[in-house]
Amino acid sequence: MTDAQKVERWIDRFPLLQALSPAHLQIARGTVHFPVLDAGAIAYELDGECANYLMCLRGRTRVFRMSEGGREVLIYKVGPGGTCALTTQCLLSGGTFPAQSVAEERTELAALPVGTFQHLMGESAAFRSFVMDDYTRLMSGLFTLIDEVAFAPLKQRLAQRLLAEADPRGVAAVTHQKLADDVGSVREVVSRILAQWAEAGLIELRRGAIEIVDRTSLEAAGRR
């Protein structure tokens, strides 16, 4: 794919860019670049400098912190058409990245250098409105996540995570350990709950995947 084709795909994925003035869009087109991360590659290190405003075109990254005991605590994930709230916060404040970000699969990004980001934030009302509206939405989602982690029972969090991971066929290509990391638990406890659900006919356990058999009952478990 040529650079011009990548730019057009970027604009299609983020229609807000069409609201920029011709001059501002030209600046964005002239400075954007398109990094590709293989699965497991690091997008941002803890306390790393934020050099770009990142917009996800394809794939998915996970943003997390490690506890003192070495347990991973998921903050959120960024998929196609999404941006990273903590990257935006980092760029707006001039601070460092307060977590870690890793690609879960091959991920293609559009990256606007910090200089372009700051220029457009100062000069383009359309770009500034998009960034702040998107940031507000993402932060609202973060507070929802905090409520879930702090107050929701483990089974409820696990059911919601499993439903979120499932593809249209109801199959979640995820390991027990990965689910445990996502819900802030340990693999042994998660495996025990999954075994209970499998015995009750809600799910079917496969090697490296889980199939949702009774979505209605699993959704009910996610609301309890």
Image (tube, helix red, strand yellow):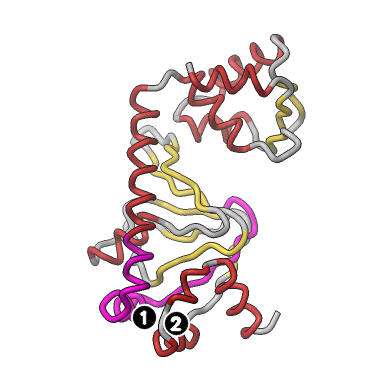
Distance of mark 2 from mark 1, alpha carbons? 7 Å
Name which of mark 2 and mark 1 comes first in the sequence.
2
Residue 46 image offset from top left, x and y in percent: 36, 54
Q: Residues within 10 Å of mark 1 (few under 14, many from 20)?
A: some
Looking at the rendered structure, the kind of residue marked 1 is Thr
Splitting the image into 4 quarters, where does residue 188 fall?
top right
Q: Where residue 5 sits: x, y (%)? A: 66, 81
Amino acid on which disc 2 is placed: Ala
Q: Is residue 26 above or below residue 210?
A: below
Residue receiving disc 2: 28
Residue at 61 percent of width and 57 percent of height:
59
Do callouts 2 and 1 mark residues in contact (Cβ within 8 Å)? Answer: yes
Of residues 164 and 46, the one nearer the viewer is: 164
**As drawn, is 103 to the left or to the right of 22?**
right
| Vertical comparison of 4 with 139: above or below | below
108 horizontally vs 19: left or right: right
Task: Using residue 173 as the reference point, say whether residue 156 is left or right of it.
Answer: left
What element does badge 1 sit on? helix
Q: Where are the magenta residues, as a range?
A: 104-132
Q: Nearer the viewer, residue 205 or 49?
A: 205
* Residue 84 pos. (x, y %): 42, 57
* Residue that badge 1 annotates: 116
Residue 27 % position (x, y): 42, 87
Q: Residue at x 76, y 30 (%)?
A: 207
**Rendered image: mark on residue 205:** none
Badge 2 marks a residue whose secondary structure is helix
What secondary structure characterizes most of the magenta part? helix
Residue 111 part of the magenta segment: yes
Closer to the camera in the image, 18 or 214: 18
